[in-house]
């Protein structure tokens, strides 16, 4: 009886000790604030249980339409590290950081990634003296500038992106550097496997059939890296107003080239895609994920699943 009593006491203190250490670990986690869900996933993978990550823009939400609130400013103000994509993707980010009073480091994940100039190849408008398309209603007036910020749609780019994040987290929390770098090494292997999967899948489609229509110009890096031609009625930002001439140009291109892949996106209004489908008699496919992940239990809840889902969805229709 006495032995049972002492066994119970020992077990009780073990449980209490474990719970207290777990609470302590949670309280000591570094606070990392990121701009959107893809960065949220990356920081979670690299940081594991040693970080608490908060995404300002929720999953399945259009970050182009995001309006920061005082609550988000308060979250930023208490962060140990702030990470953004850069290249004009988050036009509101710098103002939010300044308004919050945050004094720590703000990291741009796209540093050292080769820039991809936006090319509107199927636009009917004239070029300027430098060979750029001229149009006062296009994406250039909506915060992105001339570079495509959607770098994560190329896995080789993503390897640089993730390395930038891991190194920034290591500088923030030097005592956990070995832990972060171990997670980075494993994730790099996952990215290598993903890249092989994408190339194998895309190469199963004849080059002449690799043409896809989406809602807005989010997939330039995917097109550039893997050889899928991606066209859209809207520019780099979903705030861009699609021109009637642009829509007409795409409709002519579809009819001339027998395009058969037409996809809406998870963050966009589907009316433009429905309009094009009606004019071309093309069936609309499943939504692609562009600027935001799905909910965690959805088909694109992580970056790895996001890329696999998009490629499988595209290839299945092209086949």
Image (cartoon, rainbow, N blue to C red):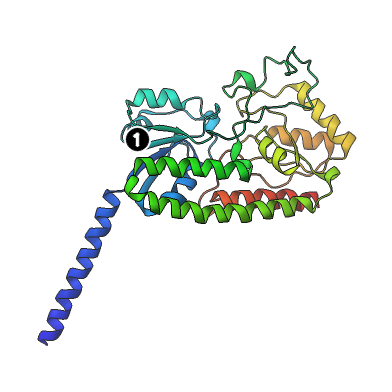
Residue 147 locus on image (x, y percent): 62, 27
SS class of the residue under badge 1?
Answer: helix
Judge whether residue 221 can be spotted in this image: yes
Could you classify mark 1 by the number of other residues whose Cα lies within 10 Å: few (under 14), some (14-19), or many (20 or more)? some
Screen quadrant of the N terminus: bottom left
Residue at the extreme top of the image, as rendered: 129
Q: Which residue is mark 1?
A: 75
Q: How many tags in the picture?
A: 1
Kindly identify the residue that appears in the image at 67 percent across and 27 percent down. Answer: 117
Query: Residue 167, percent across and down?
Result: 44, 42
Query: In this image, 264 relative to 101: left or right?
Result: right
Residue at x 55%, y 26% (from the top left corner): 88
The reply to whether residue 267 is in sight is no
- Name the one closer to the observer, 103 or 186: 186
Q: Give above or below for 219 relative to 11.
A: above
Q: Position of residue 159 (x, y in %)?
A: 56, 45
Query: Residue at the bottom extreme?
Result: 1
Residue 274, picture quadrant: top right
Q: Residue at x 37, y 23 (%)?
A: 98
- Seen in the picture, residue 311 relative to 74 is either above or below; the reply is below
In front of the other: 278 or 92? 92
| Residue 48 vertical placement versus 39 (above, below) | below
Task: Give left or right: position of 169 versus 114.
Answer: left
């Amino acid at each position: 009886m006495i032995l049972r009593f002492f066994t119970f006491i020992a077990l009780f203190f073990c449980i209490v000790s474990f719970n207290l250490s777990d609470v302590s670990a949670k309280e000591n986690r570094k606070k990392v604030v990121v701009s959107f869900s893809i960065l949220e996933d990356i920081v979670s993978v690299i940081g594991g249980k040693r970080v608490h990550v908060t995404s300002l823009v929720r999953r399945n939400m259009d970050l182009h339409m995001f309006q920061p609130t005082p609550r988000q400013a308060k979250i930023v103000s208490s962060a140990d590290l702030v990470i953004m994509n850069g290249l004009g993707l988050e036009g509101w980010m710098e103002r939010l950081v300044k308004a919050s009073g945050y004094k720590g480091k703000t990291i741009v994940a796209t540093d050292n990634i080769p820039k991809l100039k936006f090319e509107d190849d199927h636009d009917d408008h004239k070029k300027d003296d430098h060979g750029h398309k001229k149009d006062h209603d296009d994406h250039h007036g909506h915060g992105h500038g001339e570079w495509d910020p959607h770098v994560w749609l190329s896995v080789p780019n993503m390897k640089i992106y993730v390395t930038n994040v891991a190194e920034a987290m290591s500088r923030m929390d030097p005592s956990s550097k070995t832990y972060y770098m171990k997670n980075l090494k494993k994730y790099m292997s996952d990215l290598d496997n993903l890249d092989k999967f994408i190339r194998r899948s895309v190469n199963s489609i004849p080059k002449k059939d690799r043409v896809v229509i989406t809602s807005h110009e989010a997939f330039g890096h995917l097109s550039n890296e893997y050889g899928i031609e991606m066209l859209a009625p809207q520019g780099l930002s979903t705030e861009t107003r699609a021109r009637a001439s642009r829509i007409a140009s795409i409709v002519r291109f579809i009819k001339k080239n027998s395009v058969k892949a037409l996809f809406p996106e998870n963050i966009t209004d589907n009316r433009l895609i429905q309009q094009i489908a009606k004019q071309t008699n093309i069936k609309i496919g499943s939504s692609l994920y562009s600027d935001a992940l799905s909910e965690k239990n959805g088909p694109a809840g992580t970056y790895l699943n996001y890329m696999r889902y998009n490629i499988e969805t595209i290839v299945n229709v092209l086949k």
